[in-house]
Amino acid sequence: MRYKGPGDEEENRPAELWWLPYLLFLAVTAILAIPILRNLGNWGIRDWDLFTTLHAAAVRSILEYGQFPFWNPYIGGGNILFTHPEVPVLNPLFGLLLIFGPLIGLKLQVLVVYFIGMAGFYKLARQLGISFWGSLLPPPVFMLSSYLTLHFVAGHVPFHYFCALPWLLYFYKKSLGCPLHILSAGGVAAFMILGSGAAVPLLFSLFFLFLFSIFDIGQKHKFRPPFFAVLAGLCGILFAAVKFFPMFDYLARHPWIPETTVQTTPLWILPDMFFNFNQSVFADHIQGYFWGWHEYGAFIGPVVALLAVIGLIVRFKKDWPYLVLIIFSLLLVLGSFSTSLSPWDLLHHLPGFKSMRVPSRFSLLAIICVAILAGRGADAILSLFKHRKWAMALVMLATVLGTHLFVCLPVLGQAFRRPPEHPQPRKEFKQIEGDPNRMYTAFLSNMGTIKAAWLSAYRPGRCILGFVGQTLEWYSDDDAVRVIKREFSPNRIAFEIETEKGGNLVISQGYDPGWRREDGGEIKPRSDLLSFDVVRGESHIEIYYFPDYFTFGLVVSIISILMAIAGPIIYRLKTKTDT
């Protein structure tokens, strides 16, 4: 729906300027690139070490070993890789890492997701009926809120995939008019599953989508909106079944549940979260709480808040659901203010939500609603001008953009302050106890770190310890099986062995049912490590890792995608025939 008004010569101009929003978002992205790319070779702070190692392991498996990255021997004594919900091997954004390497690729990914998210929110705003000029305002409110910026700076790479949330809502809204668009919404969900967003972003996005769909129930759509919301998630699972099925199998066997979900956010911190101009990742606005400021900051600013209030007042009869969602979001943010009544604690009883922590992360729902209402408020102000509306629109946009860039640019400059290290790589892979804060250094040295930083869905560190804490690569009782030579790669390990009467060989890699012997023999867990029996006379044994349900998931993905492609084609052909 184009922004038009009778008798106003300026109103026809937006139809001719379809390219303007994307040029604007590209310009904003270029500005955001300055602090990110200023020290291109530097390493990131906080969780950047962990997620750089995680992504680099996948890149190395592909480029150096020519293997599909199923297994990660570099973290915690060996753990899943492709199956992990935060590894994006089959996602298009992973191509940046293959081309530019994990260090530069992940930095470029930050910039790409800024653009994707702003473009998506612009499309969503237009779909919601906000004018051309008014729709330019919500995208920076959402993507340049300190919420996403702080998580990016803290190295929370999975949060990059929140850039897909506006696109998910956009295609869902379009599906209410044309049901075929539910396939596009499913494609967006699959994008998250195949990316690092299969953890927090996917769960939050589908939850937000369902909440939005509830308010679309009515005489016109009846109960179709919630059904479409669920269908979008189901389509995403089927399209991305190649990852979802083995991932779900692993998480079902090894669910991660926080030690305690009773967490609170103090009420007095809300003004600082949304309005304090100092959103530094090192800010000390909150003290005595477990989480740093990167888990609380959600800057929207006073101008945006004022526009949102105006938008709500002008269209209260139609837009009151956004107010309800904002209130619900803030109640979630407060956490366990009442263990029997708080939405945060009640949410943990739902499937998939038991692993949730940090209630302040739900402020994102409020930011989305405020951004939409701010667009409505901008339209209300623009309606007061008969001529030169674009000039007033640009004034408001410049004010919002200037404010958010003023807040975000210094924060982005804090992300990559760690000088790079250039260790000499070992010729042979080895497990070491290691430093959880220097995992990438160990990775570059061709070593695996037993003491790994915390990471959801990963098993605890496992290894074979010798004398004085020395780590061993293999072990056999009474030295019954002796390893003469080992050929190591992430997914496949070959051994040349000697044994006089046979025995059991334990390998310093974490056990998972996906490990198999080339000769069909059995691999069993021993102290949660790989072990297998060797019979007398055996001299060569090769083991490899291939996750369960991968093949089945691949078949389901291929069939689902082909059906999704064929469905619209058949529908159009049938429509033409009927006509």
Image: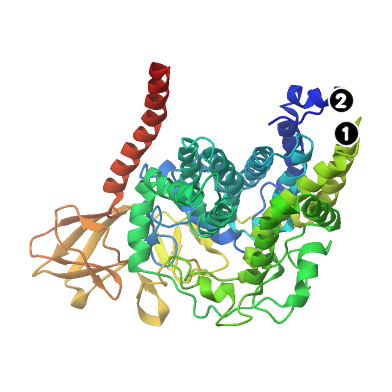
Residue 418, visible in the rendered structure: no
Left or right, residue 544 beside residue 209: left
The image quadrant that residue 369 belongs to is bottom right
Q: Label 1 crowding class (10 Å Cα cut-off): few <14, some 14-19, many 20+?
A: some
The percent coordinates of residue 286 (x first, y second) are 75, 75
Taking the view exactly as shown, the residue that stands out farthest to the front is: 219
The amino acid type found where label 2 is placed reads: Asp
* Image quarter in which the N terminus is found: top right
Nearest to the observer: residue 347 or residue 435: 347
Closer to the observer: label 2 or label 1?
2
The amino acid type found where label 1 is placed reads: Lys
- The colour style of the image is rainbow
Q: Which residue is mark 2?
A: 8
Residue at 39 percent of width and 19 percent of height: 578
- Residue 448 versus residue 346 in the image, above or below: above
| Gap between marks 2 and 1 measured at Cα | 10 Å
Q: Which of the two labelled residues, at mark 2 and mark 1, occupies the earlier sequence position?
A: 2
Q: Label 2 crowding class (10 Å Cα cut-off): few <14, some 14-19, many 20+?
A: few
Residue at 61 percent of width and 46 percent of height: 166
Residue 560, visible in the rendered structure: yes
Tally of numbered discs:
2
**Are the residues at dot 2 and dot 1 in contact (C-beta closer than 8 Å)?**
yes
Nearest to the observer: residue 114 or residue 411: 114
The percent coordinates of residue 394 (x first, y second) are 86, 37
Q: Which residue is mark 1?
A: 389
Q: Secondary structure at mark 2?
A: loop
- Residue 134 versus residue 267 in the image, above or below: above
Residue at 72 percent of width and 35 percent of height: 26
The percent coordinates of residue 572 (x first, y second) are 42, 23
The percent coordinates of residue 340 (x first, y second) are 55, 82
* Image quarter in which the C terminus is found: top left
